[in-house]
Image (cartoon, grey):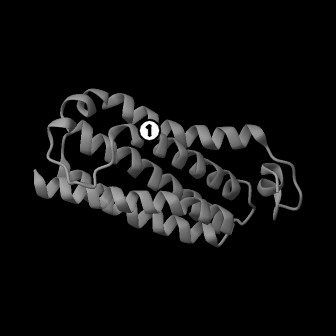
């Protein structure tokens, strides 16, 4: 099955709105890029000074993982955005927006404010919001919900990492 067939299946055969798809992905990618740019100094100077658990991934891994996750999130957003499910769509998009803001906020709190415990609080709320978003997306398009599962798993891992960094520092 081609990407076009995947993106149109279940949508009455409507064609893919490539502009909307690219915009959806771009919004998600920017939610990661902007906070990263704003906290680049802290990532380079403060973060390396922290004690970290043995399961901490190498620094080079974070960029490719997050870029991929934001791409999947953007496709999921597009699939839900193009549905016409009224109130369920509105709720799903609001939850998605909330988790995207929390995602960016975590970077600003953990790195920008150098607040490890504050980051832990934000990421726990983010985790719950991702779960709610997946549930809301599943009511509209199961593919969209499935696309968020890797994100949920990575944020779960990041939560464990944040917790251990807080305990060690």
Which of these two is toward me, 145 or 96? 145
| Quarter location, residue 17 | top right
Residue 23: image x %, image y %?
65, 38
The number of callouts visible is 1
Q: Residue at x 20, y 54 (%)?
A: 53
Figure quadrant of the N terminus: bottom right
The image position of residue 142, as x and y in percent, is: 67, 69
Q: Tell me if I can see residue 119 in this picture.
A: yes
20 and 144: which is toward the camera: 144
Judge by depth and name the residue closer to the eye, 139 or 169. Answer: 169
Neighbor class of circle 1 (other Cα within 10 Å; few <14, some 14-19, many 20+) is few
Q: Is residue 111 left or right of residue 80?
A: left
- Residue at 77% from the left image edge and 54% from the top image edge: 7
Identify whether 60 is placed above or below 106.
above
Q: As drawn, is 24 to the left or to the right of 156?
A: right
| In the image, residue 136 above or below residue 13 | below
Residue 67 percent coordinates (x, y):
51, 41
Q: In the displayed structure, does residue 32 sit left or right of residue 117?
A: right
Residue 51 lies, with reference to residue 145, above or below; the image says above
Residue 44 location, quadrant: top left
Vertical placement of residue 34 versus 135, above or below: above
Question: For numbered disc 1, what is the local secondary structure?
Answer: helix
Q: Residue at x 40, y 42 (%)?
A: 62
Residue extending furthest toward the left:
169
Front residue (pair 84, 157): 157
Residue designated by label 1: 63
Tell me if I can see residue 87 in this picture.
Answer: no
**Where's residue 161, x and y in %?**
27, 56
What residue sits 25% from the left and 39% below the top? 111
């Amino acid at each position: 099955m081609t990407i076009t067939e995947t993106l149109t299946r279940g949508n009455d055969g409507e064609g893919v709105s490539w502009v909307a798809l690219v915009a959806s992905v771009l919004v998600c990618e920017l939610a990661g890029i902007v906070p990263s740019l704003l906290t680049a100094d802290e990532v380079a100077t403060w973060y390396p000074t922290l004690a970290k658990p043995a399961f901490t991934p190498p620094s080079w891994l974070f960029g490719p993982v997050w870029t991929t996750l934001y791409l999947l999130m953007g496709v999921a957003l597009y699939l839900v955005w193009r549905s016409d499910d009224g109130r369920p769509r509105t709720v799903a998009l609001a939850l998605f927006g909330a988790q995207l803001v929390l995602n960016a906020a975590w970077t600003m709190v953990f790195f920008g404010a150098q607040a490890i415990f504050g980051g832990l609080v934000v990421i726990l709320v983010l985790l719950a919001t991702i779960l709610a978003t997946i549930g809301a997306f599943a009511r509209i398009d199961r593919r969209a919900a499935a696309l968020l599962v890797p994100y949920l798993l990575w944020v779960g891992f990041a939560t464990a990492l944040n917790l251990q960094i807080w305990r060690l520092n």
